[in-house]
Structure formats: structure tokens, C-alpha cells
Image (cartoon, grey):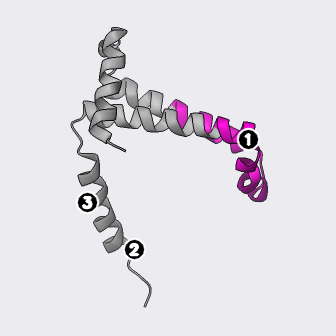
Amino acid sequence: MDLPALQQTLRDFAAARHWQAFHTPKNLSTALLVEAAELTEIFQWMSAEESQAAPLDPATKERIADEVADVLLYLLQLADQCAIDIPGAVANKLVKNAVKHPTPQ
């Protein structure tokens, strides 16, 4: 996946609809939270076992995929608005996680 190209596609999509004024970090982070909640809602009342089986149902899998895509798209737009280098941020966070959570001896 070419993240910079996808971010450009999202910028173009927003610009064509004159949405740039609404795509602030505050608004995008709020929209991201709403979409994450919609993803959570799919699994809300499922047991652990039911949630693991949910993607086996094609209709449920499609709903999950749609919400995962929404979360990712808002996250990419938020990173773009904040000039975050996603691969660099991920690499840095993985190093921090390794220090914070070392492998048990």
C-alpha cells in the first residue's frame, strides 16, 4: 500500500467536495473515534468465541471491513494534517514498545 499516494487521493477527494476547512486534526480525530466506535459496535455483545467467528459470515465480514477502512482512512488523513511520517512513527513506536515490554527471560 502506497500511503503517500492514498493520502493524496484523500486530499483530492476532500478538495473536490470543498471539505478542507472541516479536515482539521480535531475534527479528524473525532471522526476517527466515531468510526472506531462503529467497529466496536459490531462486536459489542458477542462472546470472545462469537467475535472470532464473526468474519466467517460474509455480511458481517463486509461490515467489519467497511469500518476498518473508515478507521484507516481517517487515521491517514489525521497523520497527513499533522505531518506525521507514518512508517517512521511506527518504527519509533516499535522501539519504544520493545524497551517498555522486554522479552521475558
Q: Amino acid at mark 1?
A: Pro
Q: Is residue 39 in the magenta section? A: yes
Q: Is residue 102 in the magenta section? A: no
Q: Which residue is mark 1?
A: 58
The N terminus: image quadrant: top left
**Which SS class for mark 1?**
helix
**Which of the two residues, 100 or 67, is positioned nearer the viewer here?**
67
Name above or below for residue 77 compared with residue 51.
Answer: above
Q: Earlier in the sequence, mark 1 or mark 2?
A: 1
Question: What is the number of the mark on residue 101?
Answer: 2
Tell me residue 89's x, y (percent): 27, 52
**Which SS class for mark 3?**
helix
Q: Which residue is mark 3?
A: 92
**Which of the two residues, 100 or 71, is positioned nearer the viewer here?**
71
For the point 71% across and 43% down, which residue is it? 44
92 with respect to 34 (left or right): left
Q: Quadrant of residue 3?
A: top left
Labelled pair 3, 2 in contact (Cβ < 8 Å): no
The residue segment tinted magenta is 34-63
Q: Earlier in the sequence, mark 3 or mark 1?
A: 1
Name above or below for residue 27 compared with residue 51.
Answer: above
For the point 33% across and 26% down, which residue is it? 9
Tell me residue 69's x, y (percent): 51, 36
For the point 31% across and 19% down, which residue is it? 12
For the point 28% across and 52% down, which residue is it? 87
Q: Amino acid at mark 2?
A: His
